[in-house]
Amino acid sequence: MIDLQGRVAVIFGLANKRSIAWGIAQQLHAAGAKLAISYQNERMRSEAEGLIHDLPGAEAFQCDVSSDEEIDKLFAQLKERYGKLHILVHSVAYAPAEALKNDFVLTSREAFRVAHDVSVYSLIALTRAASELMTDGGSIITLTYYGAERVCPHYNVMGVAKAALESTVRYLAADLGARNIRVNAISAGPIMTLAARGIGGLNDMLKAHAERAPLHRNTTQSEVGATAAFLASNLASGITGETLYVDSGFNIMA
C-alpha cells in the first residue's frame, strides 16, 4: 500500500469531480498526503471549497497560473502554512475554443501563445517555485495525451502544446535530478472531463479508444490517480523524465 503520510501535495487543475485532478486528489488523500488545492479565481472558489469537504484536511488557495505574481503569492502562503512541499500535480491545459474547432492550419498566433503559456510554461513557473520548498526532494507530475505524438482529430494546437510539455518534463527532470526532485508525465486515455468536452468528436474518440485498446475499455480517473500516487511515492524513486501511459494500452496499437 502506498504511504504518503507526512507529505504535502499542491494540486492545480481541480475544477470539479469530473476532472482528472479529482481522481488524483482522492488517491493522494487516501495515501495520507496533506492537500493544498489551487483554484483559478474568485469565481471558482465555491467549487473548490465544495470539493475539499470530501477531502478532510485539504485547504484551498487561489492562483491563476498565467500570473507570476499570483504564483509567487501562493507559494509564499504554502511556505508559511506547511514549511515544505513534497508533491506538485500540474493538471492544467487550455486553448481558445476556435483553435480546437477550426483546421490546425488556421491556428492564430494568439491562440498558439495562450495554449503554450497556460498548458506548458505554467509547469516551468510552478516547478521553479515549488522546487524551493522541496528541500527533502519531491515529485512533480503533469498530464499529457497521445495527441502529443500522433495526429488526433480536433486536438490541434493542444497536441503541439502537449508535445512541448513532454519535452519540458525531460528538461526539468535533468535540471532537478541532483536535488532529488523527479518530474514525470502521465499520458491518460480520453476521459469525459469538462475540459475535454471542448474537443470536437470526443464521443468518437472514446469509442475508438475502447474498441482499439488491448483492454477494450476507456481509462478511469481512479486509474490515473493511482498512477500519480505511485509516482509521488518512494516506489517510483528511480523514475524521472518519463511519460507513463495510462490508456488501456491504446498507444501500443498500430
Image (tube, rainbow, N blue to C red):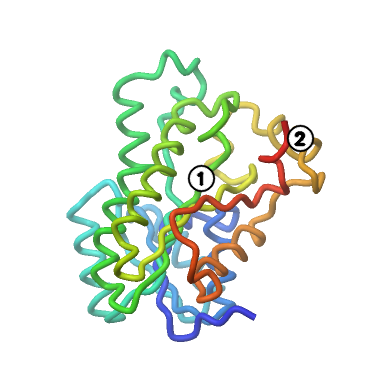
Tell me the mark number nearer the camera, choosing from 1 and 2. Answer: 1
Which secondary structure lies at badge 1?
strand
Q: Which residue is mark 2?
A: 207
Left or right? Give the position of 50 relative to 128: right
Percent x, y for residue 51? 51, 66
Left or right? Give the position of 67 relative to 17: left
Percent x, y for residue 174? 33, 55
Q: Which residue is mark 1?
A: 144
**In the rendered view, would you say 113 is above or below 5?**
above
The residue at 25%/59% (across/down) is 128
Q: On the image, which quarter does residue 49 sit in?
A: bottom left
The residue at 57%/69% (across/down) is 230
Percent x, y for residue 77? 24, 72
Quarter containing the C terminus: top right
Q: Amino acid at mark 1?
A: Thr
**In the rendered view, would you say 144 is above or below 148?**
below
Left or right? Give the position of 73 relative to 176: left
Q: Residue furthest bottom?
A: 6
